[in-house]
Image (cartoon, helix red, strand yellow):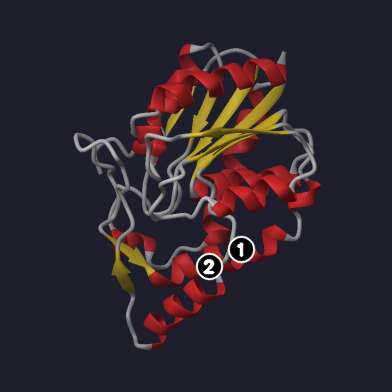
Amino acid sequence: MPGAEAWSHEGNSVGVLVLHGFTGNPSSVRELAEAFGAAGYSVEMPRLPGHGTSIEDMLPTNWVDWSSEAENALSKLAERTDQQVVAGLSMGASLTAWLGTRHPELSGLICINPAVVADPEVRLFVQGFIDAGDKVMPGIGSDIADPDVTESAYEDVPLKPILSMFEAAGEIAADLGKIQQPMLLFNSPEDHVVPATDSDFLAEAVSGPVERISCDRSYHVATQDYDKQMIFDRSVEFVGRVTG
């Protein structure tokens, strides 16, 4: 898909890993990654397996595939930088939190409308589709307040992959207290994909300091919405502060 390419940038000794969301692709966080690059930081922005091509490619993928790619990208970044920060949108923020539980050496975490709670009713809803023999259901992409912007995302949601994300969220929840790194947490009060209570849960569960910022003018894909420049500016400032 146009604009869905992964991106790597050679900058200084501080590295930032940028992760996109479920059914989306790097285009939804590309401007954020480029803001880090423009500020002089080294950047890795992978395209997660099954994303950014066709939904058929995503059907056989799951959390293990996406988390492994995120881990590999972080390893590549760590090979050429002294300090690392991870930033992610939606499922990318779930992966950010997951990496935070596994890598105490990270200097900071940036989570934007994180999906970290596995609602039992939603899981049953999805399982019902799967039991009926369905592979996809209507999509959740392009939740953006700005009418002039459309997210490049799949029109449908692959069912088994999203169920694997829910299952992973349940496992991650028990480890969130291991996160001691500073966290910058953005959330949109009017989010039609992930409820703001996910951000509440994350903020209460981690052990480290949390700086919360409300994206009052944006929906779920806030990195492409009215508050995007504020997100870019505050994120760049945060990286400088936690690595300085």
The tag on residue 109 is: none
**Is residue 97 toward the left or the right of residue 31 in the image?**
right
Name the residue beneath numbered marker 1: 168
Say if residue 84 shows up in the picture. yes
| Residue 8 horizontal/vertical position (percent) | 47, 27
| Residue 58 horizontal/vertical position (percent) | 38, 61
Question: Mark 2 falls on what kind of element?
Answer: helix
Q: At 48% across and 72% down in the image, what residue appears? A: 122
Q: At 72% across and 13% down in the image, what residue appears? A: 244
Q: Is residue 125 above or below residue 226?
A: below
Q: Is residue 166 above or below residue 15?
A: below
**Is residue 203 toward the left or the right of residue 192 in the image?**
right
* Type of the residue with mark 2: Ser
Question: Mark 1 falls on what kind of element?
Answer: helix
Q: Quadrant of the N terminus?
A: top left
Q: At 68% across and 45% down in the image, what residue appears? A: 203
Q: At 34% across and 60% down in the image, what residue appears? A: 57
Say if residue 5 shows up in the picture. no
Image quadrant of residue 78? Answer: top right
**Is residue 118 toward the left or the right of residue 124 in the image?**
right
CB contact under 8 Å: marks 2 and 1: yes
Name the residue beneath numbered marker 2: 164
| Residue 159 horizontal/vertical position (percent) | 40, 71
**Is residue 171 toward the left or the right of residue 113 in the image?**
right
Q: How many marks?
A: 2
Determine crowd level at label 1: few under 14, some 14-19, many 20+ residues with C-alpha closer than 10 A: many
